[in-house]
Image: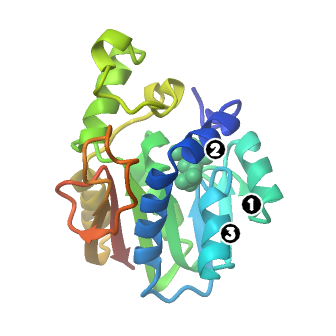
Amino acid sequence: MNSSMFDGYADHYDKWFMANDKVFLSELKLLHHCLEPLKKDKILSVGCGSGLFESVLNKEYGINNIYGLEPSQDMAKIAVKRGIDVKPGNAETGELPSEEYDIIYFNGCSTYIPDLKKAYENCYSALKKGGHFILLDVPKESAYGILYSFAKHVGNYDKDIFDKIAPELPYPIELVTSGIFYTTLDKAKIIKEYLNMTNIKFYQTLTGSPVYTNDAVEEPISGYDKGGYVAIVAQK
Ligand SMILES: C[S@@+](CC[C@H](N)C(=O)[O-])C[C@H]1O[C@@H](n2cnc3c(N)ncnc32)[C@H](O)[C@@H]1O
């Protein structure tokens, strides 16, 4: 699969979040928690997908200055319909203005990038001095990461194996098999040692087993040791 791997899956993707509404709200709260204290005159969402998070951040929290960068035309089309200003392109080579954004975030997007150093470096140049990266996704070592790595290995959610282990409506298998699951510390190492970013902080949500995470909306907490969705915040 190439960088437009989400073409053809945009509907599946949004439907999955609509069926897993509490998971969506827990992830939204995590992203908002990270954004909240930071200067945010101009924000870029890398791999903004269908713009679901951006449209709800606007409606619920009045954050209406988020731009998008997205390689999948199908996903971008929906984001544009939701009112997001989306540039086509990927994180590694997308042409971005120099030192333009206060915040650049990758929500669920690092999982689909084979060369994270190249992607983060390209986007780092578009970040203002003093600006922040927020990297949020499923860590390889989390319960979700283990479940997805196992499903990727098997190639499906075989009923006999995944009964009572996978949630009722699991994340589409095609998007699991095309994912590359990184640990939180893999990503932190790149931004710390390769990009020399500072003030690194970690926040997490979806701290239960995947079968229970859609039972209730969770408030984000500090750390990275138990979340199925973890955010790294770092400053340029
Ligand atoms: C899991 S979805 C997340 C979408 C959205 N950020 C959200 O949270 O709903 C991953 C997104 O990353 C995009 N993507 C894949 N490879 C990418 C790359 N190399 N650079 C930027 N985005 C990429 C996909 O097209 C997809 O829209």
For disc 1, the marked residue is 86
Q: Are marks 3 and 1 in contact (CB under 8 Å)?
A: yes
Q: Earlier in the sequence, mark 2 or mark 1?
A: 2
Nearer the camera: disc 3 or disc 2: 2
Q: Residue at x 67, y 57 (%)?
A: 51
Whole-percent x, y for residue 184 in the image: 26, 54
Name which residue type carries label 2: Asp
Query: Which residue is the extreme one toward the left?
Result: 225
Q: Residue at x 45, y 31 (%)?
A: 170
Residue at disc 1, secondary structure:
strand
Q: Residue at x 34, y 14 (%)?
A: 154
Q: Earlier in the sequence, mark 3 or mark 2?
A: 2
41 in relation to 176, above or below: below
Residue at disc 3, secondary structure:
strand
Label 3: few (<14), some (14–19) or many (≥20) C-alpha neighbours in 10 Å = many
The circle on residue 208 is none
For disc 2, the marked residue is 14
The circle on residue 67 is 3
Whole-percent x, y for residue 101 in the image: 58, 79
- Left or right, 129 with reference to 186: right
Residue at disc 2, secondary structure:
helix
